[in-house]
Amino acid sequence: MGNEYNPTEESFLNDVSKHSMEILLDNGVYRHLRFTNNGSNVMRFDIVTYPGHLVYSGDMGSFVFSRLNDMFEFFRTGNRVDGKLSINPGYWSEKLEAVDRCDSTQGNGFKEYSSDKFKNKVNEHVDEWIKEYAEEFNSDFEDSLRHWLERSEEAKKQGVCHTNKECKLMYSEIPQERKDAAVKAFRESDYAPSFPEIRTAIANDPEGWNIPYHSFWGMGVRNFFRGKGFGEDYFGIDNLDCIYVQLVEDAVKA
């Protein structure tokens, strides 16, 4: 259970860092507030209040809470001693009167995260993907592995295996226009939807965020760059592994 995702104040504030609030109604306890990232439906949500109730609806579900005449007073719990926001999910869940219909079959009143269900669903998708693309995947994997081994052996013979510090220095010495072209192509690629996840990973572990992604996601990214002509010869380096992390980090910057 140690791998369960536990959202934090930092992750929430990062997710809504570009959101703006639109006041559609503000009349005493009658309110309608809308929060979006430039009108996008991704992580969009609305908060509506009327006497004795607060309704949350949006991309992440729909819930109705009831406790006080002005529900803003109920949820205004203030900051903790350490300055962080204070929340009480257990107590708040007791005040739910209506819940996300997507969970009506669970009978537990509100969504619960299950790492086991998540893992099973991921494994199902992986199995389906392998069945459909196994031959193509194995071919690409073998080609990529052979390419990596050849480059690694060449690097070892020449004594140019690099530390992280050396890789960053190497990246800084590449002409900016060459890096900009590769970064632009990556930003316009099918990898763009994964950028929010990568930004969060970088924020949580600036030095080692890429380690869990290196084998498969990272391999796909490196092959993407090579396929677009941004390989070792383009950058004048011995192995794209040395700089692709920096390319990704530049691409996902807001």
Image (tube, grey):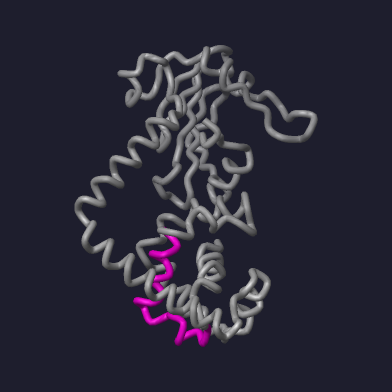
Image vertical order of residue 247 relative to residue 154, above or below: above
Q: Residue 150: where, in percent of width, then height? A: 43, 78
Q: Residue 25: where, in percent of width, then height? A: 49, 32
Q: Residue 225: where, in percent of width, then height? A: 41, 74
| Quadrant in the picture for residue 217 | bottom left
Q: Nearer the viewer, residue 127 or 172?
A: 127
**Left or right, 115 with reference to 135:** right
Report if residue 222 lies within the magenta region: yes
Point out the residue furthest to the right here: 81
Q: Tell how many labels.
A: 0
From which residue to which does the magenta span run?
A: 217-237
* Residue occupying image coordinates x 54% and y 67%: 245
Q: Nearer the viewer, residue 190 or 118?
A: 118
| Quadrant in the picture for residue 76 | top right
* Residue occupying image coordinates x 37% and y 73%: 146
Q: Please state, as top left, top right, bottom left or bottom right, where the C terminus lies in the image.
A: bottom right
Report if residue 224 lies within the magenta region: yes
Q: Nearer the viewer, residue 92 or 205?
A: 205
